[in-house]
């Protein structure tokens, strides 16, 4: 039985019809964690656009309710608001309706403010406007202390008006490994590096390609895992290196195997709000070579090897050092990586989120 003193919490399920990236991964794992919370069946309802498939969330308690309408912003701003009007609304994917009076939204970073050049002009302008309106009407959360500072500054809020509800990493231990993935990509017996994430401008693909060009080994490979975005490569691929492997989207089991066999993950991002891929690498004892930017320092601390993301020679130097060290990397740094993974748990983040939802409901 629902407690009338505790209003229903409706979860915005639009993330289920969006391409999978770090934001959608956060939303999926957070819903799974909320599903494990006490009395979840009586407290939460996942509202999804009609036709969305929530079956792979494997929810045991939280009911799923389809809401008619298309899957885009119009559904979010109209049909979702109406369906959730008698409760609290939780939006985990960085956007949400501006008219709901009791709304908690997780905005993952301030990229559309800090780096609008990484987005289509209309997209960046819309999301800047949406962020400003949500800052005035909703309760805000984000995923790191860095993003908390960034959002507070660009939205003109006190820092404590944005609560940090970080990503978890403990789900990574659930991943099985598909060891045949290496053979399918012709990587067996070859040294290779992995870059993981949607191939967007902020991922700094060009610098990785330039760094690869500085390393002469013909057997070396750089494996790019993520959704293809041809516009990203207009400049970077004018002189394509045959040692590049465009792996496209891969299953979690394939990614686990590729990380376990890699000499290192290269995380060359110019801007991030958090950065899950380094934790994925650490979970599989894969060394990490990462951009020296604030969010990545916050997540990785001393477990990663850092470089200036604008300096392809510095990245190449780090790659050469890892190759010289041989497979397995530095055991002490591998342990530091495991320690970083242990700090981030979805159930702990769900506790923080529930406390914030209780305040939003007042």
Image (cartoon, rainbow, N blue to C red):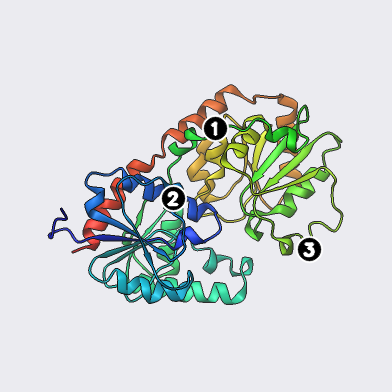
**Label 3–label 1 contact, CB within 8 A:** no
Q: CA distance from mark 3 to mark 1?
A: 35 Å
Query: Mark 2 sits on what residue?
Result: 55
Reading the chain from its start, which is encountered first: label 3 or label 2? 2
Does 198 sit above or below residue 231? above
Label 2: how many Cα within 10 Å (few below 14, some 14–19, many 20+): few
Whole-percent x, y for residue 175 in the image: 52, 35
Reading the chain from its start, which is encountered first: label 3 or label 1? 1
- Which residue is depicted at the point 52% across and 69% down? 113
Residue 166 visible within the image:
no
Residue 85 visible within the image:
yes
| Depth order, front residue of 175/216 | 175
- Which residue is depicted at the point 61% across and 68% down? 119
User: Which mark's residue is nearer the viewer, 3 or 1?
Assistant: 1
Whole-percent x, y for residue 127 in the image: 49, 72
Does 150 sit above or below residue 260? below
Numbered disc 2: secondary structure? helix
User: Which mark's residue is nearer the viewer, 3 or 2?
Assistant: 2
Query: Mark 1 sits on what residue?
Result: 176
Label 1: how many Cα within 10 Å (few below 14, some 14–19, many 20+): few
- Pick the quarter of the image with the C terminus: bottom left
Outermost residue to the top: 331
Label 3: how many Cα within 10 Å (few below 14, some 14–19, many 20+): few
Numbered disc 1: secondary structure? loop
Query: Mark 3 sits on what residue?
Result: 234
Whole-percent x, y for residue 23 in the image: 49, 55
- Which residue is depicted at the point 55% across and 54% down? 21
Whole-percent x, y for residue 204 in the image: 68, 54
């Amino acid at each position: 039985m629902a407690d009338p003193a505790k209003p229903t919490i409706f979860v915005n399920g639009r993330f289920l019809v969006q391409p999978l990236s770090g934001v959608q991964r956060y939303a999926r794992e957070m819903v799974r964690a909320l599903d494990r919370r006490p009395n979840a069946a009586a407290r939460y309802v996942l509202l999804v656009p009609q036709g969305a498939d929530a079956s792979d969330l494997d929810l045991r308690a939280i009911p799923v309710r389809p809401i008619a309408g298309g899957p885009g912003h119009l559904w979010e701003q109209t049909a979702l608001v109406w369906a959730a009007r008698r409760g609290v609304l939780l939006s985990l994917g960085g956007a949400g309706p501006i008219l709901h009076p009791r709304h908690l939204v997780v905005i993952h970073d301030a990229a559309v403010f800090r780096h609008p050049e990484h987005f289509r002009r209309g997209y960046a302008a819309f999301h800047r406007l949406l962020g400003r309106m949500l800052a005035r009407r909703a309760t805000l959360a984000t995923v790191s202390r860095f993003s908390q500072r960034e959002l507070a500054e660009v939205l003109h809020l006190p820092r404590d008006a944005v609560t940090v509800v970080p990503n978890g990493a403990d789900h990574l231990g659930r991943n099985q490994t598909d060891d045949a993935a290496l053979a399918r990509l012709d990587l067996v017996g070859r040294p290779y590096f992995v870059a993981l994430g949607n191939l967007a401008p902020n991922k700094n693909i060009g610098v990785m390609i330039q760094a690869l060009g500085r390393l002469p080994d013909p057997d070396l490979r750089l494996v790019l895992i993520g959704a293809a975005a041809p516009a990203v490569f207009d400049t970077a691929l004018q002189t394509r290196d045959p040692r590049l492997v465009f792996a496209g989207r891969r299953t979690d089991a394939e990614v686990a195997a590729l990380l376990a066999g890699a000499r290192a993950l290269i995380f060359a991002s110019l801007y991030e709000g958090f950065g899950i891929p380094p934790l994925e690498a650490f979970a599989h004892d894969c060394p990490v070579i990462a951009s020296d930017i604030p969010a990545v320092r916050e997540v990785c601390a001393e477990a990663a090897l850092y470089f200036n993301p604008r300096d392809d020679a510095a990245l190449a130097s780090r790659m050469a050092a890892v190759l010289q060290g041989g497979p397995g990397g530095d055991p002490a740094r591998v342990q530091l990586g495991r320690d970083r993974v242990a700090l981030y748990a979805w159930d702990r983040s769900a506790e923080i989120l529930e406390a914030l939802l209780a305040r939003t409901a007042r």
